[in-house]
Image (spheres, rainbow, N blue to C red):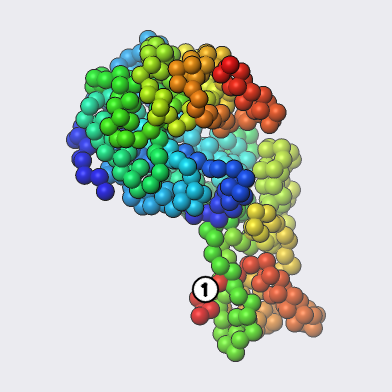
Amino acid sequence: MTGRAPPSWLGEFQAAFGDVLQAPLERASGTLRARTEAYPEALRVEVLPGSRLAAADRIAVYHRQYWFRLLTALQTDYPLVANLLGYWEFNGWAARFLSSHPPRCADIQRAGDGFPAFLELALPAQVATGSEGVRVPRDVLLEAVAIDAAWRAILLAPEVPVLDPMMLDGPTAAEIRLEPHPAFAIVSEHWPLCALRAELVHGAGVRSAPLPPRRPEATSRLLGRLGTQLLTRELEPLHAALLRLLAELPLADGLAELEASCQEAERAELPAKVQGWLSESVRIGYWRGGGRDEG
Amino acid sequence: MNGAALPLLHLERIRQRYPIVLHGVGLNLLGEAPLDEAYLDRLVRLADAVDAPFVTDHLCWTGAHGVSHHDLLPTPYVPELVELAAERARHVQDRLGRPFGLENLSTYLEFRRSTLTEWEFYTSVVASSGCWFMLDVNNIYVSSVNHGFDPLAYLRAIDFDRVLQVHLAGHTREPNGTIVDTHDQPVCAEVWRLYADAWKMGGPFPTLLEWDGNIPPLPEVIAEVELALEARA
């Protein structure tokens, strides 16, 4: 530990400077503008004017950088939402979020923690986009932010042990409650959002066509990381249901509920399918080890 | 440092072929709050894990009163902050158990309260702390243009025996004439000249070419590295 206390003026100066940085940039002019006229006089007098810029304009360089850096971080973390809304509208929502949730962590990748929950509370039924007259339904955005958030969690997932397959062969296997590994997630989509995200992140970086109409049934997809490789795979509805049930219930109860929920025609093939899906989930490391009831 | 597995896997693969040095932006050496020991714990663990020959961060503050501003922010250059920064930097180096280098900033404003030049402040902190210079030549150039000082005077103040590494990067000139350190452009001719001057004064030293945005194809990056070799001739 270090013992020297900073001079008292340092805390006051950094509080005043921080307040200026965190004030949202003005959007009324159609560009993001630092409202230098609102900077406190006590801070302005601390800064010398330069040969090119007044003191307040020099502070504004940092003010703009604060916001552009954070907005870029959120655009990077939530590319689907940013693309569906357009950057101007997205930045408006991101600025509202960051104003009420200023970053507390030295890791800028954590600045977007809580953004999905914020949108879920804040989004109206129809949301304006950057294109004039075009509005996007809240449901699309909530699916999109869930997919962005799933990928974000996968990329930030720590290294944790995977389930030991022997646990499923023991005498207490029926009572085991499994827990998904943080490097995997299952998402649902009524629009082809995972494909769009892949296009945005790995391809052109812009949406090439409008979204098609909503599909009546959701498609479930498994997202995850195998070593350094990223994985996206469509799941049969029963396969997705199995993985979800086993994350909620003891193994035997989950299997029973799955059987009860399926159609008569599906039931004959179910044991073989379940065996295959369960084996594969263990093989790819979908379940974490050291879990709730593993021992 | 955040415990995510994927970047650690990539680092491990890189480490099998190359030595890795760590360069941070979050130490907050000149923040009003005490050093974040939990952050430092994670930094020490990572430095140990990759067996980093040295670690560097910036002589600046990056957050205050519980908010992280994610920027490299300057303070007034005054003797009382020399002592504060030196004590903290010494502590960081002790915790790391390996050389710790301090990088000079690009800055866009100056403070009325300052009683030292930037290079007097920087060299005093390094000398008092027993730490090292992580000298960014582009940052010297950017600040010299923004504030109207002689960049060679800055270089002449540096003890090159204590330079761990030199950084080179590109910057952007805004319409109002301010130069901003963006790392998304090629190194400009003036910075190459300053780098050549630094090499004459204190070379050899390891050099890092920084690109954070608009990263060009690898052959262009390699061609730019070769310009560094030419500048040393």
- State the residue in front, B222 or B80: B222
What residue is shown at x 75% (from left), y 82% (from top)? A271
What residue is shown at x 52% (from left), y 73% (from top)? A290
Query: Total number of numbered labels?
Result: 1
Report the residue marked by disc 1: A290
What residue is shown at x 74% (from left), y 38% (from top)? A208
- State the residue in front, A27 or B84: B84
Q: Position of residue A261 (x, y in %)?
A: 68, 79
Q: Position of residue B229 (x, y in %)?
A: 60, 22
Q: Is residue B88 above or below residue B214?
A: below
Identify the residue at the far bottom of this view. A171
Q: Residue type at mark 1?
A: Gly
Kindly state the secondary structure of the residue where label 1 is placed.
Answer: loop
Number of residues whose C-alpha sits closer than 10 Å to that of mark 1, classed few (under 14), some (14–19) or many (20 or more)? some
Q: Position of residue A140 (x, y in %)?
A: 63, 51
What residue is shown at x 73% (from left), y 57% (from top)? A215
The answer to whether residue B49 is left or right of residue A272 is: left
The answer to whether residue A236 is left or right of residue B32 is: right
